């Protein structure tokens, strides 16, 4: 993969990638998935909530379309959204800036289940066939869509994790962040 900025890796802050919201993102080789099963897990700590700032997902540079997790302010509350061509808003309540969150998406067939800090926040109908290839920015939507804060421990699985595996992974890493 490639970094689009310098000085992004921060070994003094829980060994994370630090994004300043200006031209920062990480591209990596396409990881192909389909709706038969995949999972994405990451820790993130946002310095700000504004517009549609990509956390982890996919962007196609020929015809920029973001697929994956991003956050946005909806109706005065900070929300996380799974975008698969049509926004799927998960209501996690109001999220706070400068706070670490563990975010997991588990897709099994045509159902996407979201976990925030090991709490199953519900499921929605969602499908996805394509690739994941970007951390920290949506790319095709312009400069205002880049992440500002820290992202760490990004894991992409080619299968749906069980709730027990989500819990196991959360418990194994939470001591570094909360």
Image (cartoon, rainbow, N blue to C red):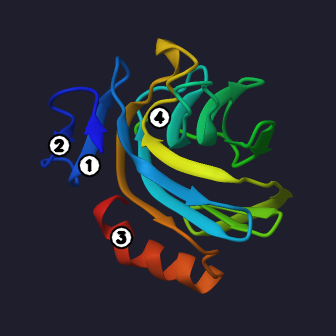
Where residue 86 appears, x then y in whole percent?
Answer: 81, 36
Name the residue tied to disc 3. 173
Name the residue tied to disc 2. 10
Rendered residue at 27%/43% (across/down): 17
Name the residue tied to disc 1. 16
First in residue order: circle 2 vs circle 4: 2
The CA distance from mark 2 to mark 4 is 19 Å
Where residue 115 appears, x then y in whole percent?
Answer: 64, 63
Name the residue tied to disc 4. 97
Rendered residue at 61%/60% (across/down): 33
Q: Is residue 27 left or right of residue 42?
A: left
Who is closer to the viewer here, 38 or 177?
Answer: 38
Mark 4 and mark 2 in contact (Cβ < 8 Å)?
no
Rendered residue at 42%/36% (across/down): 136
Rendered residue at 34%/19% (across/down): 23
Where residue 61 appears, x then y in whole percent?
Answer: 52, 27
First in residue order: circle 3 vs circle 1: 1
């Amino acid at each position: 993969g490639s970094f689009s900025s310098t000085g992004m890796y921060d070994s003094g802050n829980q060994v994370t990638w630090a994004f300043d919201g200006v031209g920062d993102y990480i591209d990596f080789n396409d990881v192909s998935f389909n709706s038969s099963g995949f999972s994405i897990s990451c820790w993130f700590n946002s310095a700000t909530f504004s517009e549609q700032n990509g956390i982890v997902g996919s962007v196609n540079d020929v015809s920029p379309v973001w697929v994956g997790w991003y956050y946005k302010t909806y109706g005065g509350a900070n929300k996380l959204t799974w975008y698969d061509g049509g926004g799927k808003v998960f209501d996690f309540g109001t999220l706070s800036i400068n706070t670490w969150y563990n975010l997991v998406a588990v897709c099994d067939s045509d159902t996407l289940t979201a976990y925030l800090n090991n709490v199953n926040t519900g499921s929605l109908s969602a499908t996805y066939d394509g690739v994941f290839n970007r951390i920290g920015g949506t790319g095709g939507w312009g400069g205002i869509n880049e992440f500002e804060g820290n992202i760490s421990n990004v894991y992409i699985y080619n299968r749906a994790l069980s709730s027990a595996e989500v819990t196991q992974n959360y418990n194994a890493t939470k001591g570094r962040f909360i």
